[in-house]
Image (cartoon, helix red, strand yellow):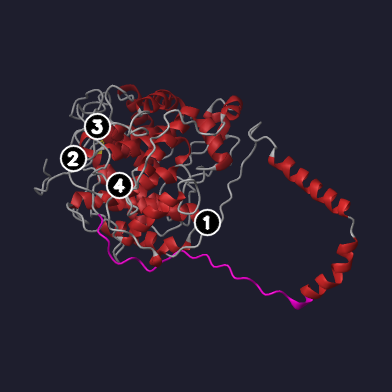
Amino acid sequence: MTNGDGATNASVPDAPQPAKSRKPKQPARGAKVAATDQTENAEVVAVEVAPSTPPKSRWRTEVRAEPKDETESDQEDELAPVKRSVPAWLVSMVFHLVVLLVLALLTTPVGEGIGSMVLEFGEATESENFELENVNIQSSDSIVDSTSDLDSEMVVDTDIQSLMDTIELPSETLETLEMVQVESGVGPASDSVKPMFGGRSGAMKSALIAAYGGTQETLNAVERGLQWLAKNQERSGSWSMAGPYSDAAPFSENRCAATAMAMLAFQGDGNTHLVGPYAKNVERGLRTLLKGQRRDGFLATNVRGDDQQAYGHAQATIALCELFAMTDDSALRGPAQAAVDYCVNAQSAAGGWRYRPRLDSDLSVTGWYVMALTSAESAGLEVPASTLRMANTYLDTVQMYDGSSYSYQPNRPASYAMTAEGLLCRQYLGWPQDEEALTQGINDLVHGGMLDPNNPNVYYWYYATQAMHHYGGEPWQKWNGVMRVELPRLQLKRGAESGSWSPQADEWGRRAGRLYVTCLSIYCLEVYYRHLPLYDKHGK
């Protein structure tokens, strides 16, 4: 397929096909979505990152031993006779009392009668000392050797049953959680910073899983997927759209996008480059992304095809912003802000983004950039309010039926995939939960575009799952009731590709490949805790 400029489209979805058809013209508010999800020329992210001069930023953990004070030494000498006179049995008794107290604290049951929770954010503690400039990133594309297949019967050691027994409905549970209220409208990050990523670990993660209908099987499926991704990381630290796994993307390579997508899957489950069971995988991927960043902030360097560059940079920007928000690692502020600045400068006059900076727009590419900017805003990075207002203006040009349906570009037919993506953008850009067009659009997706395992379309499922989750209520319960069963069921549990999802039957998977489909499926199953709910109990 070629785009309007004659360039070959080598990757992601143009516009995913809906499960059911609708009329392409704009009738009365009944027929919401057109017959086909024709997102023409919407590509799968695929860009090859060639190493360039690594940024000067580095991570440092410097621990200096403080000299002993002379008075402290004198005090120790004075206490020596006292120490020798203390009976051994008294020392032993005190020691065991302390141990018993610690054990009592550690064995206190968690999750019985969840009360109010307050999110506290502070600086993360680095797991080890390392400097980016001293890292030797190999150019070899060979993968890390793996002699063992994934365990198809693996079970995640996370007991959420007690929480699920005490919490029945999301609306009831949310009253017990100290959620962050998101203001209507758009504004600068300093006015309304949203800790989007505060539910990815610990007690809050467990509470959110229970509140929004996650299960042990959704947790197990996520873990199996992460194991597959870890197994397929290259020695260079990057991931590839082209293999070495089966059913790779049949077109062009895009290591920037593949690496960013894999990192986002790990990060969505609470891993960073500093903490988590997959911290090493994230760290190596991060080094690869930063090694390819240009001075103007652009991350998808040395790629073939403007379409590949656009997707790759947006996804890599999201990965950097998330890591900075999750860790407060000061070494990431500069690279993340530079990547965000490139996004801002690439916005077209119409308010959206597409393949070439400032020249054109489509909703498929714009959706990734809106997520990049809102992630940056949540991380406390600088995002001009005018940029977000212009993005809202662009959404006005691709909306139909007063904003309840959306198309790939102006004057194109609406589709389920573009409607889900458009509604999600509206949610992040300030629409309240009771916005009439949002309610209408969500209901249209539930009643006309319910997740169909016999017609896989993970591109559509990815956006619809997020939009439904943030909206909540009955639409989310209906959607999740199907999603949490069917997505784990579709995951491969035996063989070399155990833990992944097959792209063969997927609407866009045949073009995008196994890694693409697997990452989007993992995002769907992490939805319970990946992003904190946008609305409080009042729908604001």
Callout 4–callout 1 Cβ contact below 8 Å: no
The main secondary structure of the magenta stretch is loop
The alpha-carbon separation of the residues under discs 2 and 1 comes to: 39 Å
Residue 112 in the figure: left or right of residue 427: right
The alpha-carbon separation of the residues under discs 4 and 2 comes to: 14 Å
Q: Earlier in the sequence, mark 2 or mark 3?
A: 2
Q: Quadrant of residue 51?
A: bottom left
Work out which residue is located at the far bottom of the displayed protein and give it.
Answer: 70
Amino acid bearing label 2: Pro
Residue 38, image x and y in percent?
Answer: 19, 34
Residue 536, image x and y in percent?
Answer: 52, 38
Q: Earlier in the sequence, mark 3 or mark 4?
A: 4
Callout 2–callout 3 Cβ contact below 8 Å: no
Instruction: Label 1: state its secondary structure.
Output: loop
The alpha-carbon separation of the residues under discs 3 and 4 comes to: 26 Å
Name the residue carrying label 1: 127
Q: Earlier in the sequence, mark 4 or mark 2?
A: 2
Amino acid bearing label 3: Ser
Name the residue carrying label 2: 250
Give the residues in magenta: 49-71
Amino acid bearing label 4: Ala
Name the residue carrying label 3: 415
Work out which residue is located at the far front of the displayed protein and give it.
Answer: 147
* Residue 321 vertical placement versus 400 (above, below): below
Q: Nearer the viewer, mark 3 or mark 4?
A: 4
Residue at 36%, 26% in the rendered image? 443
Residue 258 is tagged as: 4
Work out which residue is located at the far left of the displayed protein and give it.
Answer: 6
Q: Quadrant of residue 27?
A: top left
